[in-house]
Image (spheres, rainbow, N blue to C red):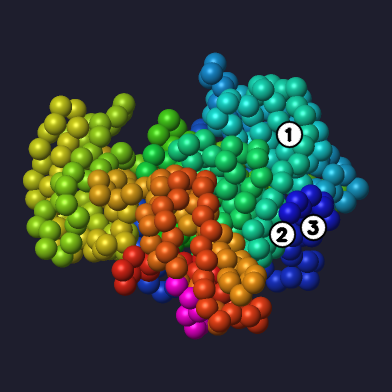
Amino acid sequence: MRFTKIALCLFTFLLGLGSANAQITERERPVEWNNLILGGRYMDRFLPMPDGELKVNVWGAKDVIPRFIDNGIEDPKISFWGGNILKDENGLYHLYVCGWPEDSPKGHMFWPNSTVYHTTSESLHGPYKIVEEIGKGHNPEAFLLADGRVVIYVIDGYYISDSMNGPWSYNHFEFDSRNRRIIEGLSNLTFASREDGSKLMVCRGGGVWISKDGISPYRQISDQRVYPDVDGRFEDPVVWRDELQYHLIVNDWLGRIAYYQRSKDGINWITEDGEAYTPDISRHKDGKQEKWFKYERAKVYQDEYGRVEQMNFAVIDTIKWNDLPNDNHSSKNICIPMNKGLRISVLNKGKITDYTQQIALLVKAEEGFNPQTDLDLGSLRFGSHRKVNYGYGSRVISVHPQKRDLIIMFDAHGCGITEEEFAPKLIGKKKSGEMIYGYAKLPYVDYTPAILSALRPQFKNGYITLKVENFGLSTSKSCDVILVVNGQPLGKAKLSAIKPYGEKIVIFKGSFTEESLKGKIEILYQKGDKTISKNTLR
């Protein structure tokens, strides 16, 4: 099924704007979040913005004046929005951003007529300057294909080029919902690269889609939204993958809170406690803040290991519908440097259980960081994020230098690591007082698991057939498939191994009719008595 109707995309985007009568109030934070330590919240990773000459004679509400206008991209004649940054082989940074004339007849609400701009800078944080107009489009996100081509997604289509400098041609993605409900339509898409060059995409509504190369049809994998289980008005997801795991940030625009999630496969997500970002993250080294009214379209710039080196946001100094033609309000794109975290891995050969006595953690040395001399060992806590984010977890027993790296032995007691853990967390400080954190690779975890996803079962000639596909990066193991309708088991069949992107048909035999498949359908994949995964088809 192909969806390219711009009306659908514009409608879903408007859901996030709210209406002129909507009352935006902050969602009440859980009381336990008050006990999170430094490093427990994703927002603790934001660093002070670059220094520069602060300007006073600029547009904006008083809370964003004075400011360093060369951070990101700003122009008094253009309202900028969205966009992310790529780096070319010569070290030049390219920000693909959209915008519209500041004196447009509808102010901010002129956004459906926005233009995609190609801008460049010799510095990651800017200033970025326009070098060309690419074409019409809104909410751009650029990414590279495995063959080196550049794609710039915009609502309802994409631009593609062999080079970051164009020329650009325009086309449309194809989307296959695979009998699944599309949540809030297909707009505000965000993309992450998988190990084989395929792309994982999360749409505005929180559905997960996969394309084998980033251009071929995106096929929906998830059965429901993957966002936190709260009654949020979600928009502006941003997804990325580093050398260990996937990350996702999504913003609840009505509750004015952004959430941070992690996953080993991009399908099954956990949510860490604490805010991902709030309106006070843009601060200078002297502590002064630029208090922008809204931060949207969060994007990440990643280093060679996939860690977030910088985030950039579309910011506006007032509520959107108060940004009128020829007034003192507008929007821009700002850049905020990030604490990238440490590269760490667990050395234990066996699984960590309640019987594990010690955990050996390897901390890698890097340029500007010597783990043998820089770490405040007494501050370190290691284990499940549910423990260390609140100041608990395992403590240091001993340390052992290994060339430039450091092996730290932790008392496993209190680590909180369970069988489901795929990336335990380290939190602490350097001797200088700077916060450190990192997520550790576990040697016994499969980080490229099979992802079994079934189409809706079909009734024909007294049988029920079920097509199962594998969207993972490893071959699945044979297992049993249980067909459940309205909570009642209807049939059981054997499913043999499926290679990545392969498919198999299983047949259920019994006394079936077409009525047998009416209602809520669940597909359970079982190994012995254990359910290893499940699909829900409503």
Q: Which residue is mark 1?
A: 159
Disc on the earlier residue, 2 or 3 = 3
Callout 2: helix, strand or loop?
Answer: loop
Residue 481 lies, with reference to residue 95, above or below; the image says below
Left or right, 28 with reference to 176: left
Name which quarter of the figure residue 36 lies in. bottom left
Disc on the earlier residue, 1 or 2 = 1
Give the amino acid type for the residue marked by disc 1 in the picture. Answer: Tyr
Q: From the image, give the main secondary structure of the stretch colored magenta.
A: strand
The boundaries of the magenta stretch are 487-492
Q: Which residue is mark 3?
A: 8
Distance Cα–Cα, label 2 vs label 3? 7 Å
Q: Assess whether mark 2 and mark 1 are in contact (beta carbons under 8 angstroms).
A: no
Instruction: Give me the residue at 20% from left, 40% from top.
Output: 362
Name which quarter of the figure residue 376 lies in. top left
Residue 502 in the magenta stretch? The answer is no
Name which quarter of the figure residue 459 lies in. bottom right
Seen from the viewer's position, the closer of residues 112 and 288 is: 112
Residue 154 in picture, x, y percent from top left: 72, 42
Left or right, 339 with reference to 353: right
Give the amino acid type for the residue marked by disc 2 in the picture. Answer: Gly
Instruction: Give me the residue at 42% from left, 64% from top.
Output: 494
Q: Which residue is mark 2?
A: 185
Distance Cα–Cα, label 1 vs label 2? 20 Å
Instruction: Report the quarter where the N terminus lies.
Output: bottom right
Give the amino acid type for the residue marked by disc 3 in the picture. Answer: Leu
